């Protein structure tokens, strides 16, 4: 089984901070860019979101197969000053190293056996908005490159649902948004800085 979502090509090119809201005029964008970073672009939630997953230090809760990696990033306010968002809540889910979600269902944590819920979890940002969690490289499956799903929420900010596309073969995958650095064990996957929109 594979995730069946089929985003239009344009959607697959959306990146965390690069895409601009289509409703804004260029002049407005230029003015805003001088004041603050552009909010991170949303992307589809996709299937297989499980709400209320426990806080975890590793998404690979039950030891699935895959190349170990560490996801490290930061959550900042898109408002002027780009203040870190302390305690931002990141709900993260992805495939294992074989391209399979666990489970391939939607629902709430309470609806499942804990042992059936893997490659997902809740991660809390620290006082500087930084987050860090162990995982394994997700596997690509046609037509999608490897990706990681995020739902990011914090008091006073609009909840953001987006995706993070891995860069494992740049010439073959135009969807890349960040580089994978394999200089340690586990490899470090630097997630793009995430900018949330204040309410
Ligand atoms: Fe997905």
Image (spheres, rainbow, N blue to C red):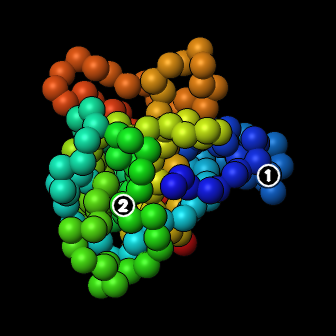
Q: Is residue 179 above or below residue 55?
A: above
In front: label 1 or label 2? 2
Q: Residue furthest front?
A: 1
Q: Residue 102 has which mark?
A: 2
Q: Which residue is mark 1?
A: 22
Of mark 1 and mark 2, the one earlier in the sequence is 1
Q: Is residue 18 above or below residue 178?
A: below
Q: Residue 4, image x and y in percent?
A: 62, 56
Cβ of mark 1 under 8 A from ligand 1: no
Quadrant containing the C terminus is bottom right
Q: Secondary structure at mark 1?
A: loop
Q: Is residue 116 above or below residue 68?
A: below
Query: Which is nearer the eye, 2 or 144?
Result: 2
Q: Is residue 196 visible?
A: yes
Q: Residue at x 54, y 18 (%)?
A: 170
Q: Residue 31, image x and y in percent?
A: 71, 44
Q: Residue 99, image x and y in percent?
A: 43, 44
Query: Which is nearer the eye, 73 or 45?
Result: 45
The residues bearing labels 1 and 2 have C-alpha atoms spaced at a distance of: 35 Å
Query: Which is nearer the eye, 75 or 2?
Result: 2
């Amino acid at each position: 089984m594979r995730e069946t979502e089929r985003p239009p090509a344009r959607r697959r090119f959306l990146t965390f901070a690069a895409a601009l809201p289509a409703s804004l005029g260029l002049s407005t964008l230029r003015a805003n860019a001088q004041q603050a970073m552009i909010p991170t672009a949303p992307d589809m939630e996709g299937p297989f979101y499980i709400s209320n997953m426990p806080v975890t230090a590793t998404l690979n809760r039950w030891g699935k197969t895959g190349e170990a990696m560490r996801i490290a990033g930061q959550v900042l306010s898109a408002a002027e000053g780009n203040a870190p968002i302390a305690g931002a809540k990141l709900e993260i889910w992805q495939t294992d190293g074989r391209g399979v979600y666990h489970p391939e269902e939607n629902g709430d944590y309470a609806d499942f056996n804990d042992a059936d819920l893997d490659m997902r979890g809740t991660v809390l940002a620290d006082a500087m908005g930084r987050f860090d969690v162990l995982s394994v490289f997700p596997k690509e499956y046609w037509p999608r490159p490897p990706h990681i799903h995020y739902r990011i929420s914090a008091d006073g900010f609009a909840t953001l649902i987006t995706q993070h596309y891995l860069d494992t073969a740049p010439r073959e995958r135009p969807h890349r948004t960040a580089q994978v650095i394999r200089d340690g064990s586990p490899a470090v996957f630097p997630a793009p800085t995430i900018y949330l929109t204040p309410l």
